[in-house]
Amino acid sequence: MKAPAGNLAPIVQRRSGKLRLTERRYPRVRGSMTEPLLLSDERWRGAKLLESGKHEAQALALTFVGDLRLTFARTFCAEAVRAYWIEIQRSGGDPWPLPTATFTAGGRLKEPALSLARRMGVAGAELDLCTASYLIGVIYTAMMPEDARSRWGSYYTPPGLAERLMNLAAQAGVDWRRCRVIDPACGGGAFLAPVAARMASASADLPAHQIVRAIGERLRGTEIDPFAAWTSQVFLEAAVMDVCRAAKQRLPQIVGVGDSLLQDVADTYDLVIGNPPYGRVTLSREVRERYRRSLYGHANLYGLFTDLAVQMTRPGGVIAFVTPTSFLAGEYFKSLRHLLATEAPPANLDFVSVRKGVFDDALQETLLATYKRGDRNTSASVHFISPTGYSDVVVQPAGRLVLPSSTGGPWMVPRSSDQEALIAFLRRMPHRLKNYGYEVNTGPLVWNRHKGQLTRHPSPETLPLIWAECVAPYGRFVFRAAKKNHEPFFRPRPGDDWLISYKPCVLVQRTTAKEQSRRLIAAELPNKFLRLHPAVVIENHLNMIRPTNGGPRVSPAVLCTLLNSDIVDKAFRCLSGSVAVSAYELEALPLPPPEELSNLTRLVQERASRDVIERACAELFHA
């Protein structure tokens, strides 16, 4: 069955107002999707049903466009949540109605979407609450229009990572019996529900009505997506339903709808926890002024939420966030690093060791971090964590982070358990590229702004165009334009002088991938190439390491060899917070004194083997 794009009628019965969510019971579904799984473990069966059902639901959602798709996603997932809610109360006496909806739906689902949604809700009831809420949440995000998902940053946290982050918060001093907690971007409730469960467990000696009242007073959540806010409230109450039933009272409204970044900070908390949205954002003048202390250049949503968390946390309180790793070293985050180092230093950093498959449909280097408001500690423990399934993680210690004396400088973090000695040595190295007589600039040509000037045919009016693929492993320069839309030559126009380079330099690729064996890939733009061509144009995906006016103290060939060594690549990975290789990070890279490079210079001149050069470079770092 395929519905015409833009028309909900074949699947949804239109009705004005909000979706009517009743307590009507219906029999447990035993359709064709569940029958083959009846002999399997129930938990495995429920998870597999939700996973396979997600693809069916996503296919149905793709038959709609724009707001209609979002309406269908909400209507479908609301029905799944309703089925879940009814199912978990089968043995609890008279069923309670669902919490009041905070979103507008489009009507009632028709077959086969209705049966699919109900089967998924029933399947979720066979799982533990955190896994059920996560899997139903990722069904919703998979069905959403991409622009809405991007705008709201709807990428939900797997239960294992949420559990790990709450354990880290407890290690940092959070007392679940007394703490006041807020998630300022709570999504589908990945943190609120288990926090409520911990609060209830820590106060198990109290009467049920006091526990319910305490949770209502001490726990808060805010979410910009009204449907996600509603599901947060539903799963939050489901997490403590036994306590609520014993108290014979409902949980009060804990989750509010709104944009935390625009709201005044009216109170402070013992714990600010969450997985804030990320992505560049354009700010109004008023918002930029509010977060001015943590901004430098482009604004990223998760950086703003980190600043907000510092504002929301009382002295001695804890911030526990899941964020990208890019803030560790990028220039755009130097003000944020200064803010954290001076007002809320890190207590622990957990690097998620894989990118793919951790956050549904997202490929992002992430970490779990805890910070202590007002602490004066200058070091933090570092771990690598590997998710196994939905609910578990494997934790491997990796050493410690020591904050730099320059509070806005990059944070050098060990990326394996054997790199602490290297980190300690790097901290004692004062020399940088500027001490070698070099500066770093980004290739000036953004090619898609000059498409009409690219050509494959050389002429007296054209110059060679140097792309990232010209820089090959092991320091090789290969003039080529091998990728789609790339051409080997550029025809300058009047006023394009700023795009043209006349002198030798070392070129370094700007964009790599975490899975690549090397992060630093450098090659010398050789003199012999420049003797054949009067000048070149260098594209934006390359960094140019160029001699300063005083002249270099180390030759480009030796510098290129050093940058291509395994030990410098390891050092750079300790420094870099993302897969991008920025000019800022290259300029911050610790290097040995230039006067100690005489042996390496001799080996380069003699064209020594790679193994011999690698050993010489390692000795420069006492490795």
Image (cartoon, grey):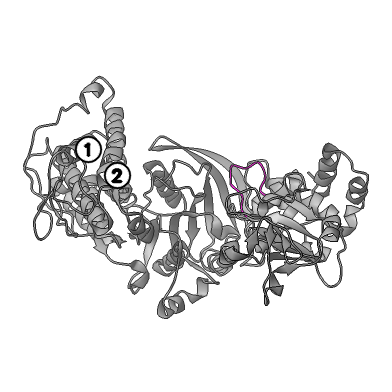
Mark 1 surroundings: few (<14), some (14-19) or many (≥20) residues within 10 A? many
Residue where numbered disc 1 is placed: 120
Relative to 254, is 52 above or below? above
Whether residues under marks 1 and 2 lie with C-beta atoms below 8 angstroms apart, the answer is yes
Q: Is residue 34 above or below residue 617?
A: above
Give the main secondary structure, helix, strand or loop, of the magenta stretch: loop
Distance between the Cα atoms at labels 1 and 2?
10 Å
- Tell me where the magenta segment starts and ends, as one range: 511-519
Q: Nearer the viewer, residue 248 or 73?
A: 73
Per the image, label 1 sits on a secondary structure element best described as helix
361 or 23, which lies in front? Answer: 361
Q: Is residue 404 visible?
A: no
Give the quarter of the image for residue 553: bottom right
Q: Look at label 2 and name its amino acid.
A: Ile
Q: Position of residue 228 (x, y in %)?
A: 27, 55
Residue 463 located left or right of residue 447: right
Q: Position of residue 289 (x, y in %)?
A: 45, 79
